[in-house]
Image (cartoon, rainbow, N blue to C red):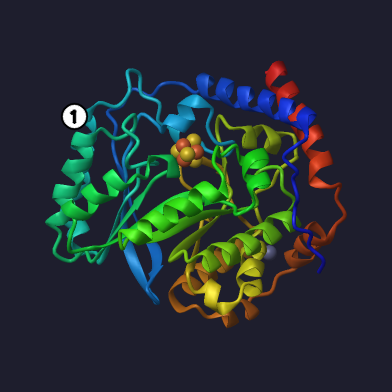
């Protein structure tokens, strides 16, 4: 199966101008998202992690915040999280602390070896005031069972000062800080995700984390908007290998979901984007060498209230393959996937093998389509 690695030059001025229009469109979509009136509440869920060679369940706590600074500037093309949680007047320090208390109430969090606190950027003061950060550290420090603490930030907010404070506040626990890299390819990250930072910036913060004896994680996305199925698979394989070779300690590979108020949704409505097939997730796992694969868990194939559509196969085999993927996270057994067959594999093969225009040419059409759809709506 021939898969091309998408290449995006960074010097194409016309395309850059069109990208600028799509970024503007993204901001307009954000502004159209309605405000929600209920009191902000945290999302808590148990997610898989694979840390230091072993599967571990993680109690994950996602606060409802005012959104990250990047969202307010322009935001990523696939991100529905901040728009879905718009609260008139923002989310105050008191509301954030209330959510921390809610996540800790009931005692469930105290039973887990791994605990994750997942605002978008822990050190982004527009999203998490320092008072709240310290409050979270205090509550986490008191968790006896929690051996690993997972946190997340965009690279521009990771500083020596912030890491010193983190280390001082949580001296006994193993720490992991994830960055939402999405792809190791700067062109794809810039043109298809509008992520706003480079692989070099990410790498510098990986080094800084390691200097503080903190593990570095990467969130990766399978099939970012604008990519074909084949490009998405090739991009994810390359990203996993590149991150692993850089020394990344843990990776989460997530199928891109379609969320409200996003450029991705406009593409989806036009029939120009489908979230990845579950077979593509399997394909990525099969292609990546064991030494790299063993740092990866796969996610993003379960429906939550923010998602319109997520990674799937046909209705008949999706539940089975999702269960296989969840089991793979625990067992690392690729042989699982040889036991499930379905007639929709032929459709997937056509999607992954079919001809397509080069990404750069397609981007022009897709960008124009997004801008015209927004003007018509
Ligand atoms: S994906 Fe993360 S960095 Fe991008 S806009 Fe959403 S919350 Fe911010
Ligand atoms: Zn099927």
Q: Secondary structure at mark 1?
A: helix
The image position of residue 227, as x and y in percent, is: 72, 48
Given residues 113 and 316, the one toward you in this image is 113
* 181 versus 342 height, above or below: above
Q: Nearer the viewer, residue 110 or 217?
A: 217
Q: Report how many numbered discs are placed on residues in the image.
A: 1
Instruction: Quadrant for residue 27, please give it.
Output: top right
Residue at point 56%, 50% (across, down): 199
Q: x%, y% of residue 48? A: 40, 64
Quarter-of-image position of residue 239: bottom right
Q: Residue 157: where, in percent of width, then height?
A: 38, 40
Question: For the C terminus, which image quadrant?
Answer: top right
* 243 sits left or right of 361 in the view: left
Q: Which quadrant does the N terminus fall into?
A: bottom right
Q: Is residue 53 above or below residue 12?
A: below
Looking at the image, which residue is at 60% across and 70% down?
285
Instruction: Evaluate whether residue 57 shows in this view.
Output: yes
The residue singled out by tag 1 in the image is 94
């Amino acid at each position: 199966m021939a898969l091309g690695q998408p290449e995006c030059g960074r010097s194409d001025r016309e395309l850059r101008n069109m990208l600028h229009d799509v970024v503007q469109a993204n901001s307009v979509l954000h502004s159209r998202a309605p405000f929600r009136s209920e009191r902000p509440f945290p999302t808590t869920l148990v997610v898989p992690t694979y840390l230091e060679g072993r599967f571990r369940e993680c109690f994950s706590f996602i606060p409802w915040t005012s959104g990250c600074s990047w969202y307010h500037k322009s935001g990523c093309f696939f991100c529905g999280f901040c728009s879905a949680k718009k609260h008139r007047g923002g989310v105050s320090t008191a509301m954030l602390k209330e959510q921390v208390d809610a996540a800790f109430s009931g005692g469930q969090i105290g039973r887990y070896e791994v605990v994750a606190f997942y605002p978008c950027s822990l050190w982004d003061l527009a999203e998490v005031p320092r008072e709240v950060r310290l409050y979270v550290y205090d509550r986490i420090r008191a968790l006896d069972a929690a051996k690993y603490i997972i946190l997340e930030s965009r690279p521009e907010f990771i500083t020596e000062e912030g890491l010193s404070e983190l280390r001082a506040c949580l001296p006994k626990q193993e720490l992991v800080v994830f960055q939402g890299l999405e792809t190791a390819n700067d062109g794809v990250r810039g043109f298809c995700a509008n992520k706003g930072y480079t692989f070099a910036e990410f790498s510098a913060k990986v080094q800084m984390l390691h200097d503080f004896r903190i593990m570095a994680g990467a969130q990766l996305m399978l099939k970012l908007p604008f990519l074909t199925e084949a490009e998405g698979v090739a991009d994810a394989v390359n990203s996993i290998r590149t991150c692993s070779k850089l020394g990344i300690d843990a990776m989460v590979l997530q199928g891109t979901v379609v969320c409200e108020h996003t450029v991705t949704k406009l593409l989806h409505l036009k029939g120009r984007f489908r979230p990845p097939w579950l077979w593509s997730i399997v394909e990525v796992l099969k292609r990546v060498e064991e030494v790299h694969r063993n740092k990866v868990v796969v996610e993003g194939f379960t429906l939550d209230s923010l998602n319109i559509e997520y990674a799937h196969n046909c209705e008949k085999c999706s539940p089975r393959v999702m269960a296989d993927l969840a089991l793979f996270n625990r067992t690392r057994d690729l042989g699982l996937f040889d036991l499930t067959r379905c007639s929709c594999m032929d459709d997937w093969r056509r999607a992954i093998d079919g001809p397509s225009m080069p990404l750069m040419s397609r981007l022009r059409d897709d960008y124009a389509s997004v801008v015209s759809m927004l003007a018509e709506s």
